[in-house]
Amino acid sequence: MSKSGQELHYPFEVKEFEPKELEEVRKRFTKAPYDDFIRVGPKGYVFYKGFLKYAPKIYNFALRPDDTFVVSFPKSGTTWVQEMVWMIANDCDYEGSVNIPLTHRYQFLEWGMLFNNKHIQEIADEYSKSDDEKKKLLAAKLKSSDVDICANKPSPRFIKSHLPLSLLPPTLLDTCKVVHVARNPRDVLVSYYYHIKTVAKLRYDIELKQLWNLFINDQLEWTPYFENVKESWTRREHPNMLFLFYEDLLKDLPSAVKRVAKFLGKTMTEDQVSRLCDHLSFENFKKKNSLVEFSAVSSDNVLVRKGKSGGWRQYFDEEMKQQATNWMEDNLRDSDFKFPFYEN
Ligand code: A3P
């Protein structure tokens, strides 16, 4: 419902998981699971049921021409690209970057869906009464709705989302600049595994191989992975879309910075590019904690963990390697999409 009480238009069908499937995906939660899972739209994107509270608001979100979006499948280098985009758009405001956490410079549109369930609300209630300032900060973050915060934020706004284009406002590309970053899904999965083990350790208990199976069977939040990536890929020639690969950034960061600058209509000297690349280097970026609100439950900076490509090889057994090859072939058969993996 909108503020005026009118029902917002939301054209997608929503399906609940079948009980048997639900049982399988719930296995990864040690405590109460997130509220139940649903599939949205013709591609069946998977979310927590709490997503429905935000989905129509997001789909009907009032865009402004000076909004900048960074979109991706989770764990594809989003945070890195967010920092790069924000810095370039803000004429390399190093002071702003140091003083304002990334989670305040960007709103994460579907953030609220992650915490819109009883278990997390109980934790948030408990933490908000704590004497520990870090816990209080986390409680406030868990209870916040970024899409509502964003609606009232002054321009220019910077917005992050892991939603595919089809679930974002339909006029997005004709209104705002959008940067998509994609990454080898095998590395995405390993990164995801560590993310949920650390940031979300309050709730999860799952082996990497189990998580992989949920991922390739489209039973993990935000999947199907390839549909998300291909939606942006097919619009990559649109003047308001810039499609980046994480692996390209690793290989040649200055070129990526220059591409983003050109896309955002900014000119940068070689010195400015070089200083920004130093700022964005893994070592320097690691020192910043982009998820400050989570320091109450995790001292690790999981958004900047290893920062390599091809790390999946240490984790995948023969069966997983074969599954990955088949899964990628199946999903890319009718597409001209190609990953620049740069690995042996
Ligand atoms: P790993 O977990 O494989 O190390 P997201 O921001 O979408 O959650 O993506 C997180 C991934 O981006 C992590 O991958 C993280 O290490 C990597 N990353 C973040 N900053 C980076 C940087 N400066 N250089 C290289 N990789 C970086």
Image (spheres, rainbow, N blue to C red):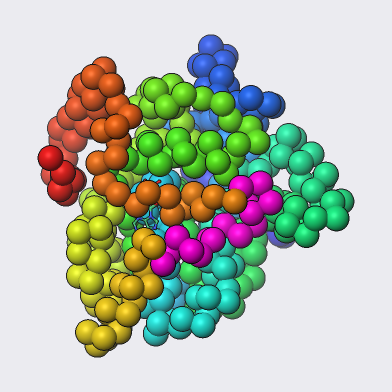
Point 47% across, 39% down: residue: 194
What is the x, y in percent for residue 304?
43, 54
Point 20% across, 64% down: residue: 252
What is the x, y in percent for residue 326?
20, 24
- Left or right side of 255 for 87: right
Most foreground residue, 144 or 43: 144
Extreme-top residue of the structure: 20
Q: Quarter of the image holding residue 53?
A: top right
Point 28% across, 54% down: residue: 246
Q: Is residue 202 above or below residue 279?
A: above
Most foreground residue, 64 or 198: 198
What is the x, y in percent for residue 138?
70, 53
Most foreground residue, 150 or 167: 150
- Left or right side of 11 for 187: left
User: In this orientation, does residue 70 appear?
Assistant: no
User: In this orientation, does residue 93 appear?
Assistant: yes
Q: Is residue 19 above or below residue 10?
A: above
Q: Is residue 176 above or below residue 321?
A: below
Point 12% across, 40% down: residue: 344
The magenta span reads 284-298
